[in-house]
Image (tube, helix red, strand yellow):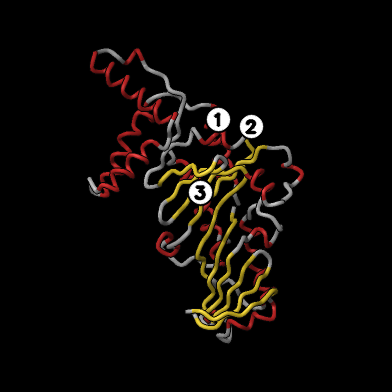
Amino acid sequence: MYDTVNFWLDRLDIAGGNPFVISNYLSEITEHQNKKGYGITGSIFDYTVNVYEGGISMKGSLPKSVFNDNIHTLTRSATQQAIEKISDTLHIDFNAAKVTRVDISTVIPTKRPPTDYYSYLGQKPYFNRLHAAKETLYYNNHKRQLIFYDKVKEAAAKGVTIPPPLQGCNLLRYELRYTKGIKKQFKTDVTAQTLYDEDFYYSIVQSWHNEFKTIHKLKGQNIMIDDMTTPKKAIDGMYDYAMAYLLQEDPDFVDRVINDLKASKKFNRSDYSKMKKKVFAPVAKNGNKNDMINELETAIFEAAKYAR
């Protein structure tokens, strides 16, 4: 389930304390001088490697180091193999390297094109929803990011060949990206060795699933006439239906209003999440899940359940 994983290996965790010992095993080496001092940049597999006196930075895709593509994401055992491959190639023990970014993802074959599902994925508490381009949907906050996109079109744009079993399929990619503050979010240092620990791998995959679960799912709305037993209940029911319908047609409406309120500094920071929860209450109350949301929820549940 891993894709991009960035690392920092401190010189204190390298036998002999000399990060430049790996220079003989890098390709395409260049030298540079910046605020970190003298350094070199090279590459192995999909990784860009920067070496400084203080340590080694590596940024890239871990599955591309094993499969040469990231359409197949890494199982726990394949993750261990990838870390061992890096260690063997660089001739150092890489297990102590600290993780500075980690993406959890998989490709989901869907009945319809991925973009057809986006309008049913509404707001998410503490995240900003951004439909930045037709093919891509983001949920952002300052520590994590969720992204949904069409893997077939992304692969075509990069000249990547889809493996034969998946050719001709609609492929929706769902990623959860931990982009900063890894130690604070996980309440411990996450190292290369941690990534293939059985308990950690299970927990981070469940987090991938749980982040999806907290997205408000927009549904086919039904107005409940039988519940309108008084004029007030009829008015409240019509209000709830109208609000749910508006959010179905324009999922970004609430974020636009909230951002305007934040810009005007009208309320306390804690008030905005309460307002969003109140506004989205009609979405939870009205309507039944449509087949497309059921399909997506089932696929993501199954992926998390059987990830090993």
Disc sitting over residue 126 in the figure: none
Looking at the image, tell me whether mark 1 or mark 2 is earlier in sequence order.
2
In the rendered image, which residue does mark 1 sit on?
Answer: 292
Mark 3 to mark 2: distance in Å? 22 Å
- Circles 3 and 2, Cβ within 8 Å, touching? The answer is no
> What residue is shown with label 2?
111
As helix, strand or loop, the secondary structure at mark 2 comes to loop
Circle 3: residue type:
Trp
Where residue 184 sits, quadrant-wise, is bottom left
Q: CA distance from mark 1 to mark 2?
A: 8 Å
Label pair 1/2, CB-CB below 8 angstroms: yes
Residue 236 falls left or right of residue 180: left
Closer to the eye: label 3 or 1: 1
Element under disc 3: helix
Residue 81's place in the image compared with 157, above or below, is below
Which amino acid type corresponds to the residue marked 2 in the rendered image? Lys
Amino acid, disc 1: Met
Q: Residue at x 51, y 81 (%)?
A: 54
Residue 305 seen in this snapshot: no
Please state the horizontal and vertical placement of residue 13, each as a whole percent of the image.
53, 79
Picture disc at residue 208: 3
Is residue 295 visible in the rendered image? The answer is: yes
Residue at 32%, 34% in the rendered image: 279
Q: Earlier in the sequence, mark 3 or mark 2?
A: 2
Query: Quick one: which residue is furthest to the right in this view?
Result: 164
Instruction: Please provide percent x and percent y for residue 134.
Output: 55, 39
Secondary structure of the residue carrying tag 1 is helix
